[in-house]
């Protein structure tokens, strides 16, 4: 076979994307020219936003904007270097203390994104001698961290503590030495499923040396008392060894952190996480945004309560229409479509009708399990929700994506809309890890 140039290697995909764009239903990278939070402007058209992770609607709160502005004036627009060298701000360390207290741990370490937090932490803490048990629907950033660590990766069926237990028993018999780390998400970003955390941490009774790593990117600010996360929701904070979170969801900024009670491990991580050492520090404006969001969440619990009211209302509306969606255990409510093409067409029609929501397709979800990923904010108005449900009802019938339609096409042959292998951990990727 003749050797291909880089351009020749990429051209088939580029032509594929060009074809989708020509047909008028390419949904991604839409340039938002202005945002009001619950509504955005795209190409001069104002739309209701139901695809944002800004769950508490804090990205436009005047107090948040003012705090970011003050930090910008005091520290400038960027830190000027990595935290390891010249970019470590006093505000960074203050936020680390706040975050550790917020999630109930002794210490936290900031990173510049949530993705880099998982990549840096997992990669520097695990080695080829170690073993990682990983939920098949875990986020791509977790997989990247696992690959970088060179540890053995053993996937288990999504949200299945029994399957995790079986894999753990087999792994410990085969690999008696080395660290054993189990990684799960608190709220799964595509399905909206809530982790069955109690069943997973219960494995520590049989395996006391098991470490549990909780990616709570979509749980921080939303789950548990005062939005302190999924571990708090279950009352299991002391049983979770590492809690990872991001700022790009309920905390209305960008960045990430990892928290733990193990001071020695976090000190090691602070000096060995490559994304932390070799990236510029978080801008002060982003850091101050998170600090203010934490203040608001702690003093205004009604925001979280309002989010859950809206989530339950929308879920009831989806059910009344006849759509197939997940249970309202998190703010993420996917609408199951099936066909990737049909999902693209559905999203295009939503856009035409003034609703911004995007499809999630392979590899974010398994093939032919495409969804329209919807997530609402605590700041959405009743009139906006009513309008969205009206549009959804009309389009669901037009495109034949009611639950009854999906059943006729055999969509529910596997009871879970997200059958293995999940969006994060593919069999191909698994085969390449730990060799």
Image: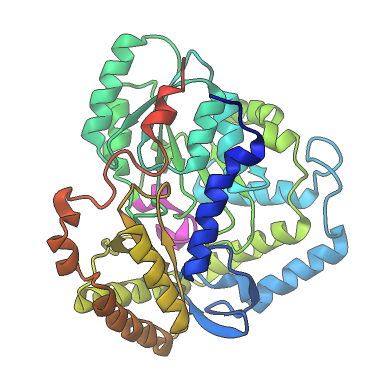
Query: Could you tell me residue 100's position as x and y percent?
Result: 58, 46
Magenta run includes residue 372: no
* Image location of residue 408, percent across then percent down: 13, 62
Where is residue 37 drawn, in percent x and y?
57, 77
Q: Is 24 situated above or below 223?
A: below
In the rendered view, tell whether residue 409 sits above or below residue 420: below
Please state if 66 lies on the left or on the right of 350 as rendered: right
Determine the residue positioned at 46% across, 62% down.
226
In this rendering, does residue 197 appear at all?
A: yes
Foreground of the two, 11 or 84: 11
Colour setup of the view: rainbow
Question: In the image, is 335 to the left or to the right of 71?
Answer: left
Image position of 119 (left or right of 409)? right
**Above/below status of 207 relative to 384:** above
Instruction: Identify the residue shown where x is 35% and y is 38%.
Output: 136
- Judge by depth and name the residue closer to the eye, 228 or 377: 377
Residue at 40% across, 57% down: 224
- Which residue is located at x 54 percent, y 18 percent? 127
- Outermost residue on the front side: it is 2
Residue 53: tell me if it is visible: no
Q: Which residues are magenta?
A: 219-233
């Amino acid at each position: 076979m003749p050797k291909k140039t880089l351009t020749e290697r990429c051209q088939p995909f580029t032509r594929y994307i060009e074809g989708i764009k020509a047909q008028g239903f390419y949904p991604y990278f839409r340039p938002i020219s202005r945002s009001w939070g619950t509504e955005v402007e795209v190409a001069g058209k104002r739309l209701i936003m139901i695809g944002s992770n800004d769950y508490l609607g804090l990205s436009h709160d005047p107090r948040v904007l003012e705090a970011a502005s003050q930090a910008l004036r005091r520290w400038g627009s960027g830190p000027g270097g990595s935290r390891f060298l010249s970019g470590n701000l006093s505000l960074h360390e203050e936020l680390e203390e706040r975050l550790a207290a917020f999630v109930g741990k002794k210490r936290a370490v900031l990173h510049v994104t949530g993705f880099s937090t998982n990549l840096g932490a997992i990669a520097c803490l695990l080695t080829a001698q170690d073993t990682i048990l990983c939920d098949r629907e875990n986020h791509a950033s977790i997989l990247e961290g696992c690959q970088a660590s060179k540890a053995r990766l053993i996937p288990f069926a999504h949200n299945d503590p029994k399957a995790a237990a079986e894999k753990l028993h087999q792994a410990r018999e085969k690999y008696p030495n080395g660290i054993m780390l189990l990684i799960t998400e608190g709220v799964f970003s595509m399905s909206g499923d809530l982790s069955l955390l109690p069943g997973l941490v219960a494995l520590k009774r049989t395996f006391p040396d098991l470490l549990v790593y909780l990616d709570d990117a979509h749980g921080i600010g939303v789950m548990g008392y005062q939005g302190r996360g999924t571990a708090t929701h279950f009352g299991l904070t002391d049983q979770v060894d590492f809690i990872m979170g991001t700022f790009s969801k309920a905390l209305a900024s960008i960045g990430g952190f990892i928290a733990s009670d193990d001071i020695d491990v976090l000190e090691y991580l602070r000096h060995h996480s490559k994304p932390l050492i070799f990236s510029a520090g978080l801008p002060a404006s982003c850091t101050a945004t998170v600090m203010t969001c934490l203040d608001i969440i702690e003093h205004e619990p009604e925001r979280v309560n309002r989010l859950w009211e809206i989530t339950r209302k929308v879920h009831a509306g989806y059910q009344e229409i006849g759509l197939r969606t997940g249970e309202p255990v998190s703010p993420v409510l996917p609408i199951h479509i099936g066909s990737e093409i049909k999902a693209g067409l559905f999203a295009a029609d939503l856009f035409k009708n003034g609703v911004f929501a995007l499809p999630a397709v392979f590899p974010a979800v398994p093939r032919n399990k495409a969804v329209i990923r919807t997530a609402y904010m605590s700041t959405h108005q009743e009139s906006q929700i009513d309008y969205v449900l009206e549009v959804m009802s009309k389009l669901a019938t037009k495109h034949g994506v009611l639950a009854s339609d999906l059943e006729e096409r055999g969509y529910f042959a596997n009871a879970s809309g997200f059958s293995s292998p999940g969006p994060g951990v593919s069999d191909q990727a698994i085969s390449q890890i730990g060799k």
